[in-house]
Amino acid sequence: MKLTDTGERVIPEKMKITNGLLLEHIARYHFAANYVHGRVLDFASGSGYGSHIIAKLCKDKVNEVIGIDVDKESVNYAKGTYYHPLTTYLNGDVTDPRLPEELGEFDCILSFETIEHVSEEKKFMANLYNLLKPGGLLILSTPFGKGRGVPCGSPFHVHQLTVNEFKNLFNDYSATSFYFQKGVLIEPADFNTDKHHPLGIAVCRK
């Protein structure tokens, strides 16, 4: 089947290898490959390329990779384009409170560039926490902006969190490490600098 490019949707087969958006998205999954193990959930998996990267790179330490996305067309595209014996693609809403009961618990959850698209943030964050096993890892990224409720200029984003709002998302976790990303470069976050960083990544242990 064909998948139509709609704004921010990343479809590697339809993008140039020099496309910055593509490269930064791929960089996040390669970063996550250092952490994932066991049962992995790719929350808002889009066209499926990221779930496929994790399954291929981490096949010796991953038991299963489930990619879930609200867009049925994207899920069907992932099934047809990124098959791997460890990977399953499902249609679902990341704010659906039934997901923890339906999917069970995971050792690692990835959620890249998702929260800025979600109006029901509390339901989304609750699902992440409830889907994660005790001691499991959440790896979440988002672009920074002017904060909740403030228009950010992107027609695809509800808003973009400030750095402090991002940091405060993870107070329920036992330990959190923060990183900044610019392009493909991902480095430990330095919150004492005035330098602007476009993206943040959190690695959180439940």
Image: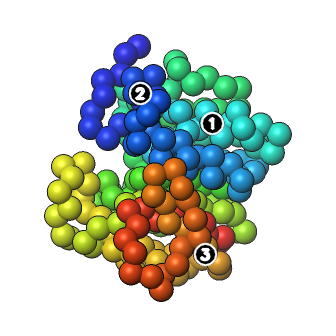
Of labels 3 and 2, earlier in sequence is: 2
Mark 1: amino acid: Ile
Q: Measured from the top left, where is residue 69 in percent x and y?
A: 44, 40
Q: Quadrant of residue 203?
A: bottom right
Q: Measured from the top left, where is residue 85 in percent x and y?
A: 71, 26
Of labels 1 and 3, earlier in sequence is: 1
Mark sitting on residue 176: 3
Mark 3: amino acid: Thr
Q: Give the colour scheme of this rendering.
A: rainbow
Q: Measured from the top left, where is residue 30 in percent x and y?
A: 63, 46
Residue topped by disc 1: 53
Residue under the image location 29 percent in, 67 percent down: 145
Residue under the image location 27 percent in, 33 percent down: 6
Residue under the image location 83 percent in, 40 percent down: 60
Instruction: Name the quarter where the C terminus is drawn.
Output: bottom right
Q: In this rendering, which labeled residue sits more in front, label 2 or label 1?
A: 2
Report the side of 5 relative to 26 (left or right): left
Tell which residue pokes out farthest to the top in this image. Answer: 1
Mark sitting on residue 16: 2
Q: In this rendering, which labeled residue sits more in front, label 3 or label 2?
A: 2
Report the side of 28 relative to 64 (left or right): left
